[in-house]
Amino acid sequence: MQVILTNFTPESERAIAAAAKLSTSQLSAVELKQRLSPEQIDNLLSQLISSGHLSPFEHANFTFVIDGISRVASHQLVRHRIASYTQQSQRYVSLRKLNYVTPATIGAKRELEAKYREMVQAAHKLYCEMLDAGVPAEDARYVLPSAMETKLVMTMNARELMHACSLRLCLRAQWELVELFQRIKQEVEKVAPRLGAELKPKCFALGYCDERQSCGLFPTLKEIKGGVATSAK
Amino acid sequence: MQVILTNFTPESERAIAAAAKLSTSQLSAVELKQRLSPEQIDNLLSQLISSGHLSPFEHANFTFVIDGISRVASHQLVRHRIASYTQQSQRYVSLRKLNYVTPATIGAKRELEAKYREMVQAAHKLYCEMLDAGVPAEDARYVLPSAMETKLVMTMNARELMHACSLRLCLRAQWELVELFQRIKQEVEKVAPRLGAELKPKCFALGYCDERQSCGLFPTLKEIKGGVATSAK
Amino acid sequence: MQVILTNFTPESERAIAAAAKLSTSQLSAVELKQRLSPEQIDNLLSQLISSGHLSPFEHANFTFVIDGISRVASHQLVRHRIASYTQQSQRYVSLRKLNYVTPATIGAKRELEAKYREMVQAAHKLYCEMLDAGVPAEDARYVLPSAMETKLVMTMNARELMHACSLRLCLRAQWELVELFQRIKQEVEKVAPRLGAELKPKCFALGYCDERQSCGLFPTLKEIKGGVATSAK
Amino acid sequence: MQVILTNFTPESERAIAAAAKLSTSQLSAVELKQRLSPEQIDNLLSQLISSGHLSPFEHANFTFVIDGISRVASHQLVRHRIASYTQQSQRYVSLRKLNYVTPATIGAKRELEAKYREMVQAAHKLYCEMLDAGVPAEDARYVLPSAMETKLVMTMNARELMHACSLRLCLRAQWELVELFQRIKQEVEKVAPRLGAELKPKCFALGYCDERQSCGLFPTLKEIKGGVATSAK
């Protein structure tokens, strides 16, 4: 898997802070943007997050090239609807070269891994054979396994990145998506460290784990006896 | 493939017309809704469409149960972001029973179809074997072919249905999606014939075919020499 | 202010539960919908909410006719982007009849209220005078006060209703919107009591108040010394 | 009215073209982005537009500071839901300084303009008086005219900019929005001339005017006797 941040809103944290400040100020956004000190920006972002006023984070956009995730992962990824995707087409591109993903639970067992590999190779061989026999790529691909790699370009704003990470950085999420969003977080941290630090699983905001079983990072509500969040219900 | 309309806005055409009328009237929407005659409703819908004022169509929603499309088709379908989907999970459901789709270009060739069937069955057999060996369903599925059937519930409003059909009823669209939206159109026609009639490929609105090659229904712009739309550019 | 629920997804709670069940079941959605008992539906909705799996709630839609809110309120309302609106146009409708909203903080002071009323009436009189002088309604309206009443049709799904209520049922929200969403909640409760009960301010889900000052329903994080949510940060 | 482009996707046209090319190529998006010549970019954008494949245009985002439009205009503007807005709050900001918009149809008539000006000033004076009397700004503003100026930050992607301009650059649109989107177009043209050139009223794409009466730029369908688009219906 390869994730590269290819485009992003320059000075994104400043842009978010200036927009937020505008809503309660008589100064113009241009003045605000110039005047804000790094400390003020930091404080503004903290206030926005702690009070749940997240819409200013939409003014910062990030475009990633994502290469080498499986069709399993891409099918889940594009369910995040508040984002833009352009994906390599299996209708128009003939995938003569075999690239596929192997889950660790399969890769760890030598015998299973061999069977898995042979099956994927056999399916891909039949795919090529069907192409040679004149079957259109868009139909031949039906035989291709879900493990096949795909690539896509994704643009997502910082608010939706925070939302997606709250779900997908949870270790209960599908493992390819966990890795994908970990890499996305790393890319964002390089150019916008303050924003990158806010990309974290939902338990950090909740203060507890809302899955059936916790990974250990935070206790579940059941485990917190007499805690605040339970008494509130 | 099975498509069943399970829920929909009652009297959807009346609801759309009443909302549209409200925007230019002093009467209340409740009065408007009661008073509109079938002819007035029909005229209002025609005006909205011919003038491109499509937002009132969003007040009519349709929920479909879709069963037996391939993962190829579902991956494309969920790219329509202005809709709601709940799909059978391959993470949590073990697909011990094999159901899959065969494209006509493969099904038509006896020898190819046999190879295709055997490959799909072999992949599914390995999937079951991996489940038995303790591989989680969410990982074992990587070996499953894209042809595997899935099912989902989709809710889409009438405006987005018109948009999706403008793309997906075009015969150049992927064949499973063409069939899916033909069935969707049939379901809508049963309960809202006027709306159902508006579900049609984009060439009807354009007056020409904007694909590289026409299916014959409308000529391309190149084929229309000296036509209106070309001279306008 | 008048709020009337004019259209809604029939049996909305059953529809949501059936869709949710589909994602982890081999049964068809149609079977599921028929078989689910009221208790099962209730349990499913509770599980979805406590685990934050809210997307199935999008399959239930509600259409309201809203009459008699100010332009102040409508301007804020339409900021909820995941919804559909058709609003009475001030461009095409001449508002010869004066209907306007008076905030309680003004209405409570007799002298101020008189000045307010006279000013609104004077502005409306000039509006009518400009119409008579041939000024188009879309320009004459610039003189109309923000207090002017408007009406609109709004369709929103249950997930977005829960989100909007989490913000707008907070007593710190603008008072017209608080009242609007209280009435919306009452309307939903009539036809879908279980869903209606889930329409509540955000503090119920958080277990604390995230505004600067609490209305008293829940304490703020600062007020909760050594509580769970604070220690989690 | 002041419109300033404060942030935008760098090299936006190249970004769009690279994403589009990815969908039908085996090269990586990074390679594609580097290799594309200006001519190739130009050709790709033209193909995307003529074939209606507009989703790659979503990868380019533009952030504008908009200052000095009326609340009339801002209420309409935020109806474009596929965009992000942060607007100056009339709840939290006391507007002691009077800034307002005068429509040309009023400004052109000396006597009317005087009455209009006096009315706006009187309303604003009462607003200040109410603030002094302890009425919260969020309530006092009910008396303010719709002509009051507001400011906001808006982020919109290139696809939605094309859509919004198709509606709002039509001379039948509300005149403030026409001017606003003309300025937006000018700002985009400075940094992305090819994209800026695509921001135009819908009649250019249709080849005819779909309003009741044409501004003269294109004839209506009725005026085009026996034309292509009519025969297609």
Image: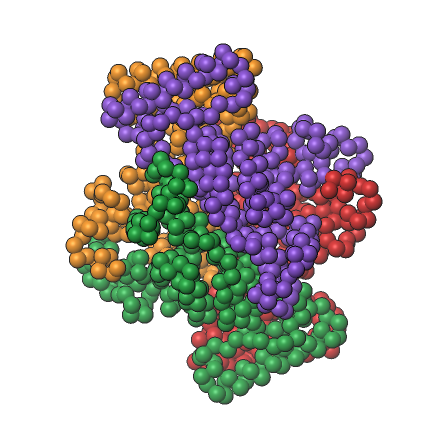
Chain colours: A orange, B purple, C green, D red
Residue C68, position as x, y percentages in the image: 53, 71
Q: Quadrant of the C terminus of chain D?
A: top right
- Residue at the far left: name it: A225
Q: Quadrant of the N terminus of chain D?
A: bottom right
Residue B173, position as x, y percentages in the image: 58, 31
Instruction: Tell me the residue at 67%/28% (across/down).
Output: B215
Do we see residue D81 in this rendering? no
Q: Is residue A66 left or right of residue C228?
A: right
Q: Is residue B40 above or below residue D161?
A: below
Q: Is residue A199 left or right of residue B60?
A: left
Q: Is residue C192 left or right of residue C78?
A: left
Q: Quadrant of residue B163?
A: top right
Q: Quadrant of residue D97?
A: bottom right
Instruction: Tell me the residue at 56%/29% (across/down).
Output: B175
Residue B176, position as x, y percentages in the image: 53, 30
Q: Nearer the viewer, residue B47 or A224?
A: B47
Residue B158, position as x, y percentages in the image: 56, 48
Q: Is residue A209 left or right of residue A125?
A: left
Count of marks placed on residues: 0
Instruction: Tell me the residue at 41%/20% (across/down).
Output: B120
Instruction: Tell me the residue at 26%/59% (across/down).
Output: A233
- Residue at the far right: name it: D225
Do we see residue D141 in this rendering? yes
Q: Nearer the viewer, residue B164 or C176?
A: B164
Q: Is residue D9 above or below residue D144?
A: above
Q: Is residue A186 above or below residue D2?
A: above
